[in-house]
Amino acid sequence: MILHFHNARLIDPEAQSVGDGTLTIRDGLIDAVGAEAPQGAELVDCGGKYLAPGLIDWGVKIGEPGERHKESFRSAGLAAAAGGVTTVIARPDTLPPIDTPESLEFATRRAADAPVNIRHMAALTRTREGREMVEMSFLQDAGAVAFTDGVRVVSDTRLLSRCMTYARGLGALIVGHPQEPGLSKGTAATGGKFASLYGLPSVSPMAEVMGLDRDLALVAMTGARYHADQITVAASLPALRRAREAGLDVTAGISIHHLTLNEYDVGGYRTFFRFTPPLRSEDDRLTMVEAVAEGLIDVIASFHTPQDEESKRLPFAEAAPGAVGLQTLLPAAMRLYHQGGLSLPQLWRAMSLNPARRLGLPGGRLAAGASADLLLFDPDAPFVLDRFTLLSKSKNTPFDGARMEGRVLGTWVAGRRVFGEVA
């Protein structure tokens, strides 16, 4: 099967460029960029819209097993395809957690229901309780792309150092959640005047700095590969910069919500705006946008966390944290583009190329031989988001009723169209 995309604006995150061009795919791979249409190829007229590598969303919660009523592999896959996400990196914080080769194999079989690629991270410790290391080698052989306990911080420093030492021998990636667990326990907002005015239990931004400092010290001691899932405050950046300059194998990510929302959005106690970590100050948000532009923050993700209505219709401090984001990652990112904070190549570097490189995946590039996971979209198409039109089973989005721009026109996975009616 040969497809030839023409009349397209190509976003190349490797070259950090945008330009008119064509792209040919053959047998699920990109065959050529900028070439004429091969004989017998099926033509796809992109109408002058943007063609880019499909998004790779790192840190997606899927409810199987245990919470299928919140999200299934199939519903998550449909939402991902509609959002231009061609590869989902799923979290292990299921019920029970993905902490054995058997549980990983079960999840992998179930993920075959999805129209997009789904890869899994495995738990770092058994049942994510921070007491005993998982069988890391067996889980890696079963397909785990990284190891993490998610938002549960491994407070036993000796155990975490052993995990890092073992992971280094395997070349495995450890994903940490930088927080000081004692300070952050039971909190729902970032400390400051606003949280005090609203009477919300809050945590100082220094809790993130303290957690990151500890993790980076252990990385320096063990030589492990490490990724901080969410760096959200400006005070964390100096330590991250020093680690890079020292040659440590360290990368960092941030959620699209922390790049587009701030602590004042919590006003009105709307629980759709409750996150872990909590939303930060506007100064922190702007600094994080600059850090992504510089490349100090490597990855932008949705941290898709489906919660049912019963989990959210509670007082703010008691409501379950998180929001769905597979379908809103692209239009939320377009806010940063239209505001002039990040260019399209910078966004695609953080949402596609860098995740692929860090996890050793074949996507994220517009180059011959790369996987033909593609996204066609219009960055200027306006709409008002209605959460009930989202394809996720759960509808907990902070963007409900928001005016947004950026519409997916077509999504292809390994050359097969999984969303859109592009002709």
Image (spheres, rainbow, N blue to C red):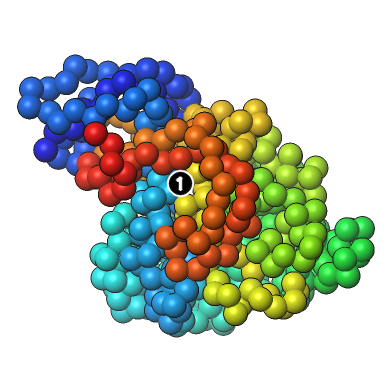
Q: Toward the viewer: 42 or 343?
A: 42
Is residue 20 something that shows in the picture? yes
Q: Which quadrant: the C terminus? A: top left
Question: Residue 79: which quarter of the image?
Answer: bottom left
Residue at the outermost left position? 40
Residue 254 vertical position relative to residue 178 in the rendered view, above or below = above
Q: Amino acid at mark 1?
A: Pro
Quadrant position of the N terminus in the picture: top left
- Relative horizontal placement of residue 106, taking residue 164 as reference (left or right): left
- The quarter holding residue 215 reads bottom right
Judge left or right: residue 196 versus residue 287: right
Residue at image coords 66%, 31% = 339
Query: Few, some or many C-alpha atoms within 10 Å of disc 1 (few <14, some 14-19, many ≥20)?
Result: many
Residue to which mark 1 is pinned? 355
Q: Nearer the viewer, residue 361 or 242?
A: 361
Residue 166 visible somewhere in the drawing: no
Please name the residue shown 29% across and 71% down the image. 110
Q: Position of residue 376 (x, y in %)?
A: 37, 35
Expressed as whole percent of the image width and height from the top left, the position of residue 212 reads: 69, 57
**42 over 237 or under it: above or below:** above
Q: Residue at x 12, y 22 (%)?
A: 38
- Left or right of 63, for residue 188: right
Residue in the picture at 52% in, 48% down: 329
List x then y, in percent, for residue 88.
Answer: 40, 56
